[in-house]
Image: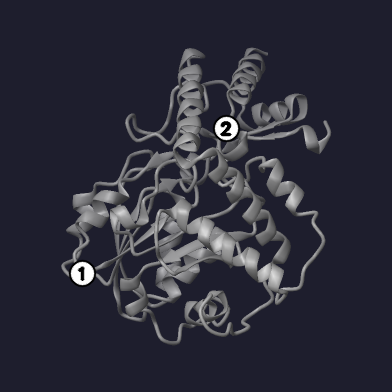
Amino acid sequence: MPLTDRILMGPGPSNPYPEATLALGQPMLGHLDPEFLHILDETCDRLRTVWQTTNPLTLPLSGTGSAGMEAAFVNTVQPGDPVVIAVNGLFGERMVDVASRCGAAVIRVDTTWGQPIDPEEVLSAHARPKLIAAVHAETSTGVRNDVAALAAGKGDALLLADCVTSLGGIPVDIDGWGVDLAYSGTQKCIGVAPGLSPFTMGPRAIERRVPRPRSWYLDLGMLAEYASTSGARKYHHTAPIAMILSLHAGLGALLDEGLAAAWARHAECGRLLQDGLEELGLQLFAASGHRLPELTTVCVPDGADDAAVRRRLLEDYGIEIGGGVGAFAGKVWRIGCMGHTARVRNVTLVLAALEEVLAR
């Protein structure tokens, strides 16, 4: 089946908005060209709207969401700093790894995969942490964690939120909730090819920023001087121009639709998909009441060959869904319905195809 006919419904990249794809083919500009810098400034403004923040330090980092994760830790954590990290999936685990590499005294708060974190347990894990970190939408399990509750009770600590799979798909309110720094990715609900990490850092985090972080490339003090619209910009690195043009267009499509409308579209598709899977007799994995509409996890039924089913969907129908990870590899499917892919017609197609494949 031609690649252009495939529907990406896994936990990874979604099918991009057409506007974002077209932007990748625009004539190349120089990274210091005034026209490009104008587009960069507009992109940062659009990100502020999507993040629902006025943070001046809001920009697309050159790298995927994992680069955003690393930037958050290396710019706020020094050796010995107590850092509380909520872990109920693979990306909470990854936060622990990155913070440990920064020398942090990590306090893990573990919750069973598939279940939401308990905000009170996280908040009471340490008397005076420098940083509390959690994944808003856990990509490995399809669970939504209550970041707003963590923000409300964080006290003097900074709060870091991984919003890779949530930004653009479900409400994310950085200023309203009181999140100090957050990162996302472009390839999921924002509907742009992977390669950038939308990032935002509030004033409390800026005040406590590590003055000379271990990473030169991800030094937010230097990057802020390049992204600044006030005064002379200081060159830092060659920006990924085509990717930023694409993000600019993808954010434009999202904002033209309206955030509330995009959230509602994702919610409708997620509900239809999850209801449809249960009607097929399948068991959903994530805890009821905390399921993400944009990423549904479903248990592989007894007798089904995980890899064979996913291969048949891809080869016969052009539909890609993801498998489980960690202890749930071979036991769970992860079906993404996000960004431009979040359409009722795609839900109808994947349900029909899955039913037919399972009946063979």
Q: Quadrant of the C terminus?
A: top right
- Residue hosting label 1: 156
Q: Is residue 152 visible?
A: yes
At which x and y percent is residue 122? 24, 55
The picture quadrant where one finds residue 75 is bottom left
Along the horizontal axis of the image, is 125 left or right of 293? Answer: left
Counting labels gives: 2
Mark pair 1, 2: CA separation = 38 Å
Please give the label number shown on residue 14. Answer: none
Q: Residues within 10 Å of mark 1 (few under 14, many from 20)?
A: few
Quick one: SS at disc 2?
loop
Quick one: SS at disc 1?
loop
At which x and y percent is residue 39? 64, 63
At x 48% / y 44%, what residue is drawn? 140
Q: Is residue 110 above or below residue 95?
A: above
Are the residues flagged by discs 1 and 2 in contact, CB closer than 8 Å? no
Of residues 83 and 19, the one nearer the viewer is 19
At x 42% / y 71%, what residue is drawn? 73
Please give the label number shown on residue 342. Answer: 2
At x 40% / y 43%, what residue is drawn? 171
Q: Is residue 297 visible?
A: no
Along the horizontal axis of the image, is 136 left or right of 295? Answer: left
